[in-house]
Image (cartoon, coloured by chain):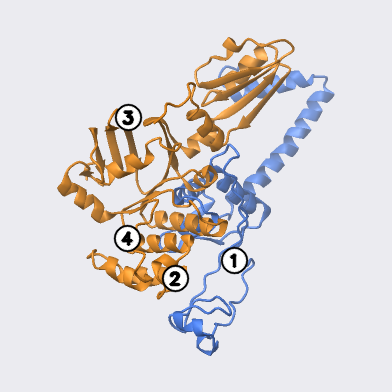
Amino acid sequence: MTSDNVIETHALAKRYGDVDAVHALSFQIRGPSITGFLGRNGAGKSSTIRMLLGMIKPTAGSGMVLGHRIDDPKQSLLIRRRTAYIGEEKGLYAYMTVEQLVRFTSSFYPDWRPDIEQRLLRMYQLPLRRKVKALSKGMRTKLALLLALSRRPALLILDEPTEGLDPVSIEELLQMLTGIAAEGTTVFFSSHQLAEVERIADSILIIERGRLVLDVSLDHLRENYRRVTAGFPARPPEAEFRLPGVERVRASGRQITVLASRNADAIVERARSLSAVSVEVEPVSLREIFLDAVRTDAPAEAR
Amino acid sequence: MPVLFQGLRYPPVAPPKLHRWWLCGTNRARQGRCVGCRLDKPKSTTVSYQWYSSVIFKLNPSSGQPLYLQLMQQVRHAVATGVLQDGDLMPGIRTLAEELVVSHNTVAKAYTELEHEGLLELRHGSGAYISAKRGVKSRADRVRAAQQRVRELVNSLQAEGLSNEEIFRLFEAEVLFPHDLPPRL
């Protein structure tokens, strides 16, 4: 490997007809870490993941996963050998029993680890003789995880893994993800559950309409993003708050709210110098940052 | 997210009797896990128990402070209050990350920083031990003693008629710009 980036893309793009699904996407992910991949429905998350796995060909740009090129069929095979993917539909054969499916899947991978398989089977308490179609959603997710983890992948990609799970199963899944990341697997997952992402991820990527809008570590985000609310005796001059690091200014009556990605102190200073009667600085949750990042000024075009 | 290391107590108490799964009588025991007491089947009859210090850490993901800093502060606080004491074994990075359901990088960063501070000793392959022999406590004592001396000095200066502002400036100048001052008499 030339670098220790697990995933690396340069101006990756995918067009379907005249729709730009993914546009000039460039990012790097270092391992082992946990990365949350966020975006609205149809923002291009699944397309990006499919390109990384070589399931679809990028229209333009290039990408490397685990040091292999994603658009080369031979190297894509090497990627898939060391990468596990759990999609929205888990892709499990419904007519097999759990035991059959585990044996069937294991025969494809020479580096299958029976010890991990046994440990996970015990931990998840999966009914060996039940058919996959009779499993609950949570059990199916656990089975898919088992099939993925028994190969000890270097990279685990999940597409909305917590969708449709009950709170207990979600908690177990998150615990599992933190556990395998600690063992050296890089986890890359897309999700709409921002509170979960905020808990376990090291960094996040937010894409909107195929474009990367935010690529930041959560520690940086917690340290620097602030919302400053200031009250004034008279109508405040909104333009005075256009400082570097200010993402959004909203004025309502005599109050002004500023969302800042850095420089919160300078904004407080400015508010004080404009004789604000009250200044409040609060941390910002990932939910607000996400909503701000994907906020569309124009109504989203029909797709 | 309050997390208590389950079944682990501080101060350490004697480990419980081994669960004799083969006498348990439940069918599930054959699968290696007993439903009656939820203990895994021991691999051998000699099981070594390691006791972590049980501390409740609470990390708030939306508090505007990096999680590793929150964790560091809580360890420091636990040491200051004596909940964690010198030689206590902290859970491993992986264990704690899984218990708190945060990324291992968060715990690793907190542990490394705490090690730099000298509050934690990472012994390879053995674990992370609290190291609060002298540094922290004696420092607090030294500060307390210094505070007493400063109080006496300030009282006597006030008695001589200096204003608080003047005393404050003198201190400030002495600490911040010691080289710009006229040589001592």
Q: Chain of mark 2?
A: A
* Local SS, label 4: loop
Query: Which of disc 4 and disc 3 is earlier in sequence?
Result: 3
Query: Which of disc 2 and disc 4 is earlier in sequence?
Result: 2
Q: Nearer the viewer, residue A68 or A129?
A: A129
Query: Which x, y percent locates residue B95?
Result: 49, 60
Using the rendered image, report if marks 3 and 4 lie on a common chain: yes
Residue A80 image label:
none
Q: Quadrant of residue A92?
A: bottom left
Using the rendered image, report if marks 4 and 2 lie on a common chain: yes
Q: For marks 1 and 4, give the CA distance.
A: 28 Å
The residue pinned by badge 1 equals: B6
Type of amino acid at the residue the image marks with label 2 = Leu
Q: Residues within 10 Å of mark 1 (few under 14, many from 20)?
A: few
The residue pinned by badge 2 equals: A126
Visual hue assigned to chain B: blue
Visual hue assigned to chain A: orange
Q: Chain of mark 4?
A: A
- Mark 2–mark 1 CB contact (< 8 Å): no
Q: Chain of mark 3?
A: A
* Local SS, label 1: loop
Q: Chain of mark 1?
A: B
Query: Which x, y percent locates residue A117?
Result: 36, 69
Q: Residues within 10 Å of mark 3 (few under 14, many from 20)?
A: few
- Mark 1–mark 4 CB contact (< 8 Å): no
Type of amino acid at the residue the image marks with label 4 = Arg
Type of amino acid at the residue the image marks with label 1 = Gln
Query: Which x, y percent locates residue A282?
Result: 63, 31
Residue A152 image label:
4
The residue pinned by badge 3 equals: A19
